[in-house]
């Protein structure tokens, strides 16, 4: 057993108020090297001990800002220098798009740096030896007591004075804590071959098991049941048909269920003669017609059918729907143009149902009548 060295004098208190009071007195007395131990954080302790604000905030600030800057530079380099691609007509250096990533990187780097600095610089991990470890004092203050420990290295330290000081504060169980040379020179065992070997073994084992599971085990029966299924994958070769194609075209003339093909394709005159608008001219039909017209027709024909498109010349303007010709067309002919298209106007049969088209036809009549009202409409 080597020589004992005095580390500190400790005193125990029963209530939070007492310990706060003792801390106040200790800082007033002029002690610098002392510490207070409580089972949980106490409000007002920083003030009582007159502690300056923690320096951890500066670490967070510096590392956080560096993280933001690094993210900005990385994204700038990737999207404006190394691989410039125009996305949605935006400039290569589009700052607003970088903000979320910069924010995330700031938060991530600042929080990781804070934790690591706290553990490895402030707490000096992995070295966790401390004279107060394994003392009765530490046992009590980590359970239900409050303690103060005044260190021997303090300039104002003097055994008799400190003892008296603690007694004045009404401390119970005033004890001296000693440590020995062995404890000071204690080296943490993190670089021991045994420990490194254990880490290596664990790393190899986990990666080996992961590799085996994902690359081998999943391909062995019975674990491969999801992969080996009795089915033909799209694009795969089939041995069933001579041509080797797995995907087959529908038989000529196949019609989807519930779908009636348009029978007047390419025959506007026949459509005009044979097709009759089955819908009544009611408020709900006209409202449906207006809604669908505004959505599908107005971009080119204008809201009132005057041929004033909103497409700014990207598509040729259509003729007015108020011409003598269209006004005298029967409903079936307009139905035909919408269903079958006419010259450059495309067919709308895949976007609109038959009923919707008939509703639009009624609505077109409303537009026409609004611009060419007869004497009788005024009565
Ligand atoms: C992409 C633009 C565009 C859209 C959308 C569009 N049309 Fe047309 N429409 C045209 C053009 C262009 C013409 C002229 C075609 C031609 O050269 O015969 C035309 C022609 C017509 C005609 C015949 C006019 C005439 O004088 O021969 C009618 C009726 C018509 N459209 C109705 C509609 C209705 C109803 C809708 C909505 C379902 C619609 N169009 C949607 C561009 C469009």
Image (tube, helix red, strand yellow):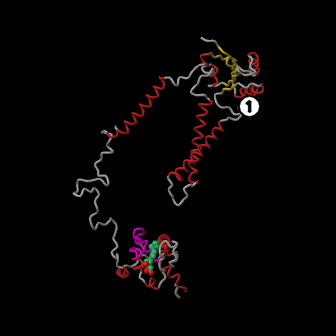
Question: Which one is nearer the viewer's eye here, 83 or 1?
Answer: 83
The N terminus lies in which quarter of the figure? Answer: top right
In magenta stretch: residue 346: yes
Q: Is residue 119 above or below residue 105?
A: above
Position of residue 233 relative to residue 320, above or below, is above
SS type, badge 1: loop
Q: Position of residue 333 (x, y in %)?
A: 40, 80
Residue 378 is one of the magenta-drawn residues? no
Q: Please say whether residue 230 is visible from this viewpoint.
A: yes
Q: Please report the residue visible at 34 percent of the width from the left and 75 percent of the height from the top.
A: 265
Quadrant of the image where one finds ligand 1: bottom left
Foreground of the two, 74 or 109: 74
Q: Is residue 150 left or right of residue 182?
A: right
- From the image, which quarter does the C terminus lie in? bottom right
Judge by depth and name the residue closer to the eye, 283 or 242.
242
Q: Residue at 29% x, 57% y: name it.
A: 247
* Residue under pointer 1: 50
Say above or below: 248 vs 132.
Answer: below
Look at the picture and state if 99 lies above or below 29: below
- Res 277 quadrant in image: bottom left
- Give the image location of residue 71, x and y in percent: 56, 46
Q: Residue furthest front?
A: 81
**Which portion, as a residue range, is magenta?**
338-362
Between residues 356 and 343, which one lies in front from this camera angle?
343
Residue 280 visible in the displayed image? no
């Amino acid at each position: 057993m080597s020589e004992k060295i005095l580390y500190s004098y400790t005193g125990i208190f029963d209530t939070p108020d007492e310990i706060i009071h003792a801390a106040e007195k200790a800082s007033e007395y002029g002690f610098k090297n002392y510490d207070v131990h409580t089972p949980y954080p106490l409000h007002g302790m920083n003030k009582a001990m007159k502690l300056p604000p923690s320096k951890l905030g500066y670490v967070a600030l510096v590392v956080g800002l560096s993280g933001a800057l690094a993210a900005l530079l990385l994204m700038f380099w990737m999207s404006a220098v190394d691989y410039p691609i125009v996305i949605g007509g935006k400039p290569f250096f589009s700052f607003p798009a970088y903000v979320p990533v910069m924010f995330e990187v700031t938060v991530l780097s600042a929080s990781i740096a804070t934790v690591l600095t706290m553990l490895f610089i402030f707490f000096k991990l992995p070295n966790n030896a401390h004279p107060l470890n394994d003392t009765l004092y530490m046992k009590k203050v980590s359970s239900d007591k409050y303690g103060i420990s005044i260190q021997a290295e303090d300039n104002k330290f003097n055994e008799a004075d400190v003892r008296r000081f603690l007694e004045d504060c009404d401390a119970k169980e005033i004890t001296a804590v000693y440590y020995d040379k062995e404890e000071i020179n204690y080296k943490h065992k993190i670089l021991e071959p045994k420990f490194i070997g254990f880490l290596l073994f664990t790393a190899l084992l986990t990666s080996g098991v992961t590799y085996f599971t994902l690359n081998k085990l999943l391909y062995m029966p019975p674990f491969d049941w999801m992969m080996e299924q009795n089915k033909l994958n799209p694009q795969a070769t089939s041995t069933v048909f001579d041509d080797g194609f797995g995907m087959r075209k529908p038989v000529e003339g196949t019609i989807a269920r519930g779908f009636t093909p348009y029978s007047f394709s390419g025959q506007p005159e026949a459509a005009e003669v044979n097709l009759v608008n089955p819908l009544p001219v009611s408020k709900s039909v006209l409202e449906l017609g207006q809604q669908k017209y505004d959505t599908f027709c107005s971009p080119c024909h204008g809201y009132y059918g005057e041929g004033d498109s909103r497409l700014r010349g990207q598509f040729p303007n259509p003729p007015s729907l108020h011409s003598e010709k269209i006004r005298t067309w029967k409903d079936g002919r307009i139905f035909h143009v919408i269903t079958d298209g006419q010259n450059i106007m495309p067919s709308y049969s895949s976007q609109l149902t038959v009923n919707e088209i008939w509703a639009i036809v009624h609505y077109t009549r409303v537009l026409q009548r609004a611009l060419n009202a007869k004497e009788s409409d005024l009565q």
